[in-house]
């Protein structure tokens, strides 16, 4: 019996993992979809973007090297699952690879992401000490304290991390299901809203005097 | 290519170039089209149905792809590699969207296809401001009819006879998809304010149309359309032009100069191959510039000779002048009344299904600004993006099931109101050649000058006021920090990507560059068939008018060619 949550295992595919091994150096690909991170040991970091004419129909994985270390990734998994744990049919954030996405985001060479990088990484570093080897009670307390923090750095980290987690989660098929997005399917016509939807609308409009 | 004999060289392959090529080739003329960008085929390159999760960074915009990863734009956006432009010191900001691909901006455009109205062609006669066109609505109306029938436009409705908002004749339009929940919802607020809401005219095939596929009512038009159900030059104009056997297309050909013969007529153009850096000259019996208002002006200004030391057709300093854009701004609101609606497929037809044409033509004095704007409104349960967390206020701390429930409840409850308004041309808005900056191939680049007038900033303030009133009537909450000062809220010059008017049409060569058919006054076999010829910038998005005018001008060119007068 342990207090520690299951360690996060990256959800990236084996091809990408192997490509990263060449770059990150100390990361070890141990099987399909499983990467164990270690501290970086040399190797040239790729910092280029995807360019102005990337292939759109089958997008390639973002080319830049990932910079998050294992402790940051594990902390990201704990926080992402605090924000969106599994619930009923809806999977947890970490099972959808949200920590990998956070890594992709903070590692990206573009201005918005470069700006977010220290906010996220410093926040994860500060949080990791309080959650990685803590008791369940201490970990829960540390996570619960985040949003209420009066420290502007911590608050900025919380807001940004939550924003990224929610965005990463709800842009997946599981996210679509959870939030009730039923589009992106070909149709022969657009019938417009159902009678049920229209009835609800009319009730609401009546309340507004419209 | 060198051995062919061409009746016309067309520079550019977007709305103006594509339509010119369509009509010239189908009328039997041999045409060489030069496109600065790469070849592009929407049938195999469009990311139909891709989700954001499949894209790097979940598809958000970056400097490489400013409108998002899946936006159709190739090698471009606000900056094009190797092809800079500058903004003059002391100018207000100006920004210039360019793609480098066959079909140009028709691949990603908003597909809003509104006709200019009768007042739009004679604005000076109405209020003494700006300039009148040398043509009337009635001159263009038959070409609007033909264009709508060719490209496929939705929005059919019984005639409404609204002032300056033309009804298309029966048979021109297809029916728009029915209003979605948010469109039914906002219509009531406008109705209560006495403002009509009508079907949007969208360049989307919503019904049966011979030779075309019908919209799948899914996946955004801005990515392009692999089945050709919306209008793109690359799916609607260029394939039939190619089928005539009269069209040759050369891509990666960046035209920088119109070449003249000894008699002062155009004999062809010079271009640089973007890939090899090699310079080439090609010849034809006529030249059609349709490179986009900025690039068309740049080619003219760079075409210097002893007869035209300040640039071709620029003896009276008219080239680059009267540069215009649309006034634009948006305000978003969140509406508790729309929370918790049963899940509905709101993907729709790509464009808005309804919109609000300008309603204040008879109230301009009391409004305090001339001219007006229409409103484009977006909302509904659209495919989630990285902006999903905007449904939560910063101080909302919920996590877990409470967070899931909040997002589920509020999904689809926001509506964005965007104004697009008329700009009156002024002396402070123009482009010229930068005296020092050159592109990668040594060709002088454009330098822009910009200053919004009071007519535009007052109009922008009115947009904000209107949107806030509508949001309030609907019981909504506007986004935090709405800017109400029109001077600060207004878009940047060029930001609406409606830049037009750098080589306007007119009655004679002292006040214009071309005649009503885009034929230049200075060089009789040189034609301009893009937005550069426009005299005013009505609130209506310019693409449909660029297409209609290009068709009308190309038809005149055919007549001249058949008379042997090229």
Image (cartoon, rainbow, N blue to C red):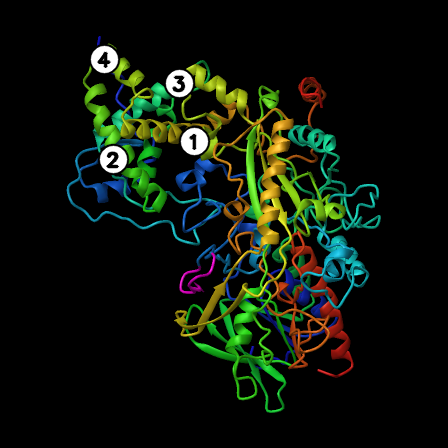
Q: Which residues are magenta?
A: B80-92
What x and y, as percent, mark residue A1? 22, 8
Q: Circle 1 — which element? A: helix
Q: Looking at the picture, do discs 3 and 2 lie on one chain?
A: no
CB atoms of marks 1 and 4 within 8 Å: no
Spatial CA distance of label 1 from label 3 is: 14 Å
- Residue pointed to by mark 1: A167
Residue B82 within the segment the image draws in magenta: yes
Q: Residues within 10 Å of mark 2 (few under 14, many from 20)?
A: many
Chain under callout 2 = A
Task: Give coordinates of residue A135: x percent, y percent.
Answer: 21, 12
Residue at image mark 3? B399
Residues tagged 3 and 4 counted as in contact (Cβ below 8 A): no
Q: Which residue is mark 4?
A: A138
Secondary structure mostly seen in magenta is loop
State the image quarter where residue B135 is shown: bottom right
Residue B359 belongs to the span the image colors magenta? no
Q: Chain of mark 1?
A: A
Q: Which residue is mark 2?
A: A68
Q: Are marks 1 and 4 on the same chain?
A: yes
B444 lies above or below B344: below
Earlier residue among tags 1 and 2: 2
Q: Secondary structure at mark 2?
A: loop
Mark 1 or mark 4: name the one nearer the start of the chain: 4
Query: CA–CA distance between discs 3 and 2?
Result: 24 Å
Return the residue found at the far bottom.
B262
Label 1: few (<14), some or many (≥20) within 10 Å? many
């Amino acid at each position: 019996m342990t207090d520690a949550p299951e360690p996060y295992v990256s959800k990236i595919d084996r091809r990408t993992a192997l490509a990263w091994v060449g770059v990150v150096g100390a990361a070890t690909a141990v099987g399909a979809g499983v990467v164990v991170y270690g501290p970086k040991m040399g190797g040239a970091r790729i910092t280029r973007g995807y360019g102005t004419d990337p292939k759109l129909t089958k997008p390639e994985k973002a080319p830049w090297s990932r910079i998050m270390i294992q402790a940051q990734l594990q902390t990201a998994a704990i926080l992402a699952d605090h924000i969106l744990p599994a619930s009923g049919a809806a999977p947890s954030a970490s099972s959808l690879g949200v920590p990998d996405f956070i890594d992709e985001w903070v590692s990206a060479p573009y201005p918005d992401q470069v700006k977010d990088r220290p906010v996220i990484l410093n926040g994860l570093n500060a949080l990791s000490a309080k959650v990685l080897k803590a008791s369940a009670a201490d970990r829960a307390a540390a996570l619960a304290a985040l949003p209420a923090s009066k420290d502007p750095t911590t608050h900025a980290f919380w807001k940004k991390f939550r924003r990224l987690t929610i965005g990463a989660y709800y842009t997946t098929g599981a996210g679509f299901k959870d939030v009730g997005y039923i589009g992106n399917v070909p149709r022969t016509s657009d019938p417009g809203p159902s009678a049920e939807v229209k009835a609800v609308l009319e009730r609401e409009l009546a309340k507004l005097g419209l | 290519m060198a051995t062919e004999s061409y009746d016309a060289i067309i520079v550019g392959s977007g709305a103006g170039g594509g339509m010119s090529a369509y009509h010239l080739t189908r009328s039997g003329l041999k045409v060489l089209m030069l496109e600065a960008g790469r070849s592009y085929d929407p049938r195999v390159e469009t990311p139909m149905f891709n989700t954001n999760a499949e894209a790097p960074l979940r598809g958000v915009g970056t400097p490489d792809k400013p409108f998002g990863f899946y936006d159709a734009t190739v090698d471009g956006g606000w900056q094009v590699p190797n092809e800079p432009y500058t903004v003059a010191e002391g100018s207000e900001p100006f920004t210039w969207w360019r793609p480098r691909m066959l079909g140009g901006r028709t691949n990603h455009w908003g597909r809003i296809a509104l006709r200019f109205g009768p007042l739009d062609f004679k604005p000076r006669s109405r209020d003494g401001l700006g300039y009148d066109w040398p043509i009337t609505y009635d001159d263009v109306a038959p070409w609007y009819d033909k264009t709508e029938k060719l490209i496929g436009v939705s929005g059919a409705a019984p005639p409404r006879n609204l002032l300056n908002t033309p009804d298309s004749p029966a048979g021109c339009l297809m029916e728009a998809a029915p209003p979605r929940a948010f469109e039914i919802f906002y219509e009531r607020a406008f109705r209560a304010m006495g403002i009509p809401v009508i079907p949007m005219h969208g360049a989307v095939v919503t019904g049966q149309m011979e030779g075309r596929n019908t919209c799948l009512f899914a996946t955004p038009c801005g990515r392009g359309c692999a089945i050709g159900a919306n209008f793109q030059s690359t799916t609607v104009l260029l394939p039939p032009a190619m089928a005539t056997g009269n069209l040759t297309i050369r891509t990666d050909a960046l035209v920088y100069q119109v070449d003249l013969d000894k008699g002062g007529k155009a004999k062809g153009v010079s271009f640089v191959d973007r890939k090899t850096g090699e310079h080439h000259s090609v010849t034809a019996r006529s030249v059609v510039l349709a490179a986009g208002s900025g690039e068309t002006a740049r080619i003219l200004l760079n075409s210097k000779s002893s007869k035209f030391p300040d640039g071709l057709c620029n003896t009276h300093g008219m080239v680059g002048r009267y540069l215009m854009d649309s006034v634009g701004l948006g305000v978003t609101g969140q509406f508790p009344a729309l929370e918790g609606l049963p899940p509905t497929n709101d993907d729709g037809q790509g464009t808005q299904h309804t919109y609000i044409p300008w309603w204040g033509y008879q109230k301009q004095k009391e409004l305090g600004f001339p001219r007006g704007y229409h409103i484009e409104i977006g909302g509904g349960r659209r495919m989630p993006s990285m902006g999903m967390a905007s449904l939560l206020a910063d101080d909302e701390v919920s996590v877990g099931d409470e967070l899931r429930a909040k997002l589920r409840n509020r999904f689809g409850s926001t509506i964005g109101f965007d104004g697009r308004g008329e700009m009156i041309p002024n002396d402070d808005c123009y482009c010229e050649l930068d005296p020092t900056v050159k592109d990668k191939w040594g060709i002088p680049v454009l330098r822009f000058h910009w200053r919004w007038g009071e007519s535009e900033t007052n109009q922008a303030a009115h947009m904000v006021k209107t949107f806030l009133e509508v949001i309030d009537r609907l019981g909504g909450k506007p986004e935090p920090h709405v800017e109400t000062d029109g001077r600060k809220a207004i878009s940047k010059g060029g930001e609406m990507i409606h830049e037009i008017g750098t080589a306007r049409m007119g009655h004679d060569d002292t006040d214009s560059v071309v005649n009503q058919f885009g034929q230049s006054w200075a060089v009789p076999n040189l034609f301009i068939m893009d937005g550069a010829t426009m005299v005013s910038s009505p609130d209506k998005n310019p693409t449909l008018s660029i297409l209609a005018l290009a068709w009308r001008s190309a038809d005149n060119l055919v007549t001249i060619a058949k008379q042997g007068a090229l």
